[in-house]
Amino acid sequence: MKSKNKLFLIFLPFLTSCSFNKQFYDTEKITTSFKKETIVTKTGDTTYLNIGPGYQPTFTDSRDKPLPLSYTFESVNFKNDKGNNLVGWFAKPKNIVNPEITVLLLHGNGTNIVIDFFSIIQLVKQGFQVFTFDYSGYGFSEGKPNRKRVLADANDALNMLLLRPDVKNTKLVVYGESMGGQLAATAASENEAKINALVMEGAPSSHKDIAARIVKPIGFLARILVKNEYSSVKSVARYHKPLLIIQSSEDKTVPLSMGRKIFDHANDPKSFYEIKYGHIAGLSYYADSIAV
């Protein structure tokens, strides 16, 4: 009994303060002095991602010469409802004049658009045009994140995207990774009439569930003290359009059981795709089958 009381005293400040909220949004901020990122592909090739004015990305080889690419990248800067500048990238395949599908990619809590470069490219290679952006306080974006703020940012990004002429006549898919998956489910349920499909990869079933997993010894306290704000299971229960849930059986961050729990609460039409490898590795290894 004494050991349980000791654990309670250790974890109580962590659970009841804003520090626990930061676990949901571990911001990957990029300094304004950032200019170049080295990217090594699976084949061992090296590409340099360069950031120019307006956060416009360009790509060069080891000799600093422009690379001939099969896709284009456009930097998109837009204001959220708080007036903060959010930075995103809109990528298109060059070999398709009018892509039929636009993907709004919502990244996870410990990443940003630079780190998520490979996810963007894998989707573009499948013939989709892709827009991704950094939430408030992430990457080059202004502001500070919290659960309500990133949801408002996602809604602002969706509405901004729908105003683009090159998006209006396409089908719109919201694809969320990890915490971005829970965010995607909520944004999709709130904007169901505006979108065509939802994809959730490695998404936790709720804030309470993932909090309990983080502090396993006293997980019951996490469930009591942590607010859900919104959750995957409640959001998918309100969503009625096509849904694909992707979850790895080898995921050490978000277990397979959470993906199954989301699926059980979801409405038809729905599909569950069980994969291998680690957390949100779907686009790295299964992009072809995910795109079908």
Image: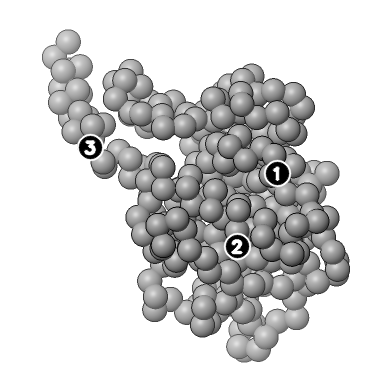
Tell me which label, 2 or 1, sits earlier in the chain. 2
Q: Residues within 10 Å of mark 3 (few under 14, many from 20)?
A: few
Residue 206: image location, x then y, percent:
47, 29
Residue 118: image location, x then y, percent:
63, 60
Q: Where is 27 relative to 198, above or below?
A: below
Reading the image, the residue beneath label 1 is 195
**Tag shown at residue 166:** none
Is residue 4 visible to the viewer in this orientation of the structure? yes
The residue depicted at 29 percent of the width and 25 percent of the height is 225
Tell me which label, 3 or 2, sits earlier in the chain. 3
Q: Residues within 10 Å of mark 2 (few under 14, many from 20)?
A: some
Amino acid residing under circle 3? Ser
Question: Would residue 77 appear left or right of 270 to someone viewing this image?
Answer: left
Please tell me whether mark 3 or mark 2 is closer to you in this view: 3
Amino acid residing under circle 2? Phe
**Tag shown at residue 17:** 3
Reading the image, the residue beneath label 2 is 117
